[in-house]
Image: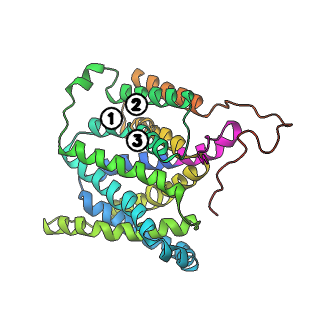
Amino acid sequence: MNHARPPPAGAAVLLPLGFLALATLFWAGNAVVGRFASEHIPAFTLSFWRWAAATLLLLPFGMRHVWRERAGYMRHWKFFLLISALNVTTYNTLQYWALHWTTAINVGVLGASMPAFIFVLTWLTGEERASGRALCGMFIALAGVLWVLCRGDLGALAALRFNAGDLLMLVAIVSFAFYSVLVRRAPVRVNNTGLLTFQCAAGTVGIVPFYLWDLAGGAGFALNAVNIAVVLYVALLPSIAGNLCWIRGVQTGGANLAGLSYNLIPMFISVMAVLFLGEVFAPHHAVGLGAIFAAFYLAVARRRRVKTSTPRSAGWRCRPRPWR
């Protein structure tokens, strides 16, 4: 039996699209704040305290769900540890480490390949089908992101050179693609807040060796108001709110739509750079934004009308049941 589900169509896509847009907005803000904090807080140290603080903030709300659903966590502990390692430990830690070795434009270009990795994984697992519209949208979005990253000069792409940081970022992207696919295929339904609490706690433990590496090298940061505000920001919005929105968006909209929405991150970064860093909004930003929105239209436009007289057994009536 073919269990592949088509992506949601029409108005049904607005809710997951809203969740995914919020997630990418929060993560884009994390990039802007992280760039500011890079001169004050070491990468692994920021990553550790980001998730440690998020865990402490989530415990009062999520621990009761984890305890109530402990039978499912214990029965499928390998699955939950795996997605925690893929998301919190591997993706985030390798991304910070990659930025130590490579340039922002290289990381951005590699990050734009996320939808392609997700599409391949969902196709291999039979999770979703991708129409010609979705594929076309994916490539248009990729072209728009590349246009922004090369600042409207395709010659800039020819100067790219791959190094250890590029390879680390590629591993990070593959890790997050696997996470985005697996989180929708959980063997048991659990509460989203409890799931994120578990991921934050387990993932933070995985970051400890990297944090100790920073400490062994004499790294640290001053406990002043600015640094504390940075840690609280990345713990609250990118770590908690961003992940909850992403989980909900993947559950209700599917991994392919989530992968396409990932391309909003460089767009949001461009806007915030204008607002908070004083950078100029150039024509290539407008071209990139237009390509992204065109891609979303192609990916989510209703492609098949189901008449009211259509039998219940026909059409695309089955949508994924969200976790409670």
Q: Residue 192: give x, y in percent of width and height.
A: 56, 64
Q: Is residue 196 above or below residue 67?
A: above
Cβ atoms at labels 3 and 1 below 8 Å apart: no
Q: Is residue 261 above or below residue 143?
A: below
Q: Residue 321: give x, y in percent of width and height.
A: 66, 56
Q: Judge by depth and name the residue closer to the eye, 275 or 110.
A: 110
Mark 2, residue position? 145
Q: Which corner quadrant holds the C terminus?
A: bottom right
Q: Is residue 237 left or right of residue 48?
A: right
Q: CA distance from mark 2 to mark 3?
A: 16 Å
SS state under label 3: helix
Q: Amino acid at mark 2?
A: Val
Which label belongs to residue 109? 1
Inspect this view and state whether residue 90 appears.
yes
Q: Is residue 289 above or below residue 223?
A: above
Which label belongs to residue 117? 3
Query: How dense is the environment of label 3, judged by Cα within 10 Å: few (below 14), some, or many (20 and up)?
Result: some
Cβ atoms at labels 1 and 2 below 8 Å apart: yes
Q: Residue 208: give x, y in percent of width and height.
A: 27, 69
Q: Is residue 123 above or below residue 50?
A: above
Among the 4 quarters of the image, the one containing residue 7: top right
Q: Residue at x 37, y 28 (%)?
A: 148
Q: Residue at x 24, y 42 (%)?
A: 166
Q: Judge by depth and name the residue closer to the eye, 320 or 29.
A: 320
Range covered by the magenta-colored residues: 1-22
Outermost residue toward the front in this view: 1
